[in-house]
Image: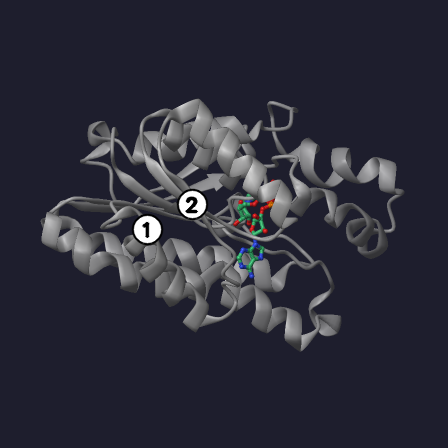
Amino acid sequence: MRNRNAVVTGSTTGIGLATARELARQGCHVMLNGFGDRAEIDRLCADIAAQSGTTIVYSGADLSRPEEARAMMADAAAALGPIDILVNNAGVQHVAAVHEFPDDKWDLLLAVNLSAAFHTIKAAVPAMRERRWGRIVNTASVLGMVGAPHKPAYVATKHGIIGLTKSVAIEVAEHGITCNAVCPGTVLTPIIEKQIAQQAQVTGLPEERVLQAVFLDRMPTGRLIPPEEVAAAIAFLCSDAAASITGTAIPVDGGYTTH
Ligand code: NAD
């Protein structure tokens, strides 16, 4: 993947950061995106660049805003050149019963977890078609395949992004572009850490039981998935070797969806 240009959204922490590191390690120039302390993010970019020898840039675009998603893609092309690889990974969660679910959270989750991917894909596809090569990977979730209580917006967006993945995959296949989704089980990242208190509230479980009862008991492997294992699957989907894999939703889930 030497000298491919990549955008990885939501890559200041967790799965996105591990993916940005892995793509850079394999020779990609990468635009990172996401929230966080600016000085820390600058250090992160410098660290990845020093290890990979590739160009690493950052966009603080708020992907809940379509105009910022579009501007980020234009900035990425201006900084790196035409974008070959797009990983739509930014995501947010909110846990509440459907009858109490706040309207603004519903709108936020739809915007970040689903609509942002539409806007970035729309911006990325023309240059990929022109160059007859492209890789789009969307981070869905096991909750794009099965339901879960107290997460109506998250489950809807993750099912939605798998639908978007399939539709785009069919459309762009003849142009040398693939579009796939990965479906992680439980990876201990900030998105899960922030949920522990909310889950304790809606389930009535003590906080120290939540990780085991809500997340780990569902995975036959019984262990948290390291972000690097999801990143490895994403990087494979971005490689030349994965040219015939398209329109798929690949579980990286410790067996979560087998039962
Ligand atoms: P995380 O909280 O570490 O990462 C989320 C990233 O998205 C961060 O970089 C954050 O700054 C960014 N982000 C949030 N709102 C944004 C916005 N409005 N604009 C731009 N960036 C924004 O969590 P993670 O687990 O690494 O999540 C990455 C993806 O993986 C998400 O789509 C999540 O739904 C999915 N996922 C995670 C798990 C898990 O167990 N951790 C399981 C399945 C799927």
Mark 2 is surrounded, within 10 Å at the Cα level, by few (under 14), some (14 to 19) or many (20 or more) other residues, namely some
Quadrant of the snapshot with the N terminus: top left
Q: What percent of the width, then of the height, locates residue 257?
A: 51, 38
Measure how far apart labels 2 and 1 are at the Cα level.
8 Å
| The furthest residue to the bottom | 103
Left or right of 53, for residue 198: right
Left or right of 162, for residue 34: right
Mark 1 is surrounded, within 10 Å at the Cα level, by few (under 14), some (14 to 19) or many (20 or more) other residues, namely some
What's the amino acid at mark 2?
Val
Q: Residue at x 32, y 34 (%)?
A: 28
Look at the picture and state if 254 lies above or below 152: above
Q: Quadrant of residue 5?
A: top left
Q: Residue at x 41, y 57 (%)?
A: 161
Residue 257 appears in the picture as rendered = no
Q: What percent of the width, then of the height, locates residue 11?
A: 51, 44
Numbered disc 1: secondary structure: helix
Q: What percent of the width, then of the height, locates residue 70?
A: 37, 66
Q: What percent of the width, then of the height, locates residue 30?
A: 38, 41
Look at the picture and state if 194 lies above or below 4: below
Contact, mark 2 vs mark 1 (Cβ under 8 Å): yes
Number of numbered callouts drawn: 2
Q: Is mark 2 within 8 Å of ligand 1?
A: no
**Which residue is under mark 2?**
57
Foreground residue among 223 and 220: 223
What's the amino acid at mark 1?
Ala
Left or right of 178, for residue 22: right
Q: Quadrant of residue 106?
A: bottom right
**Which residue is under mark 1?**
79
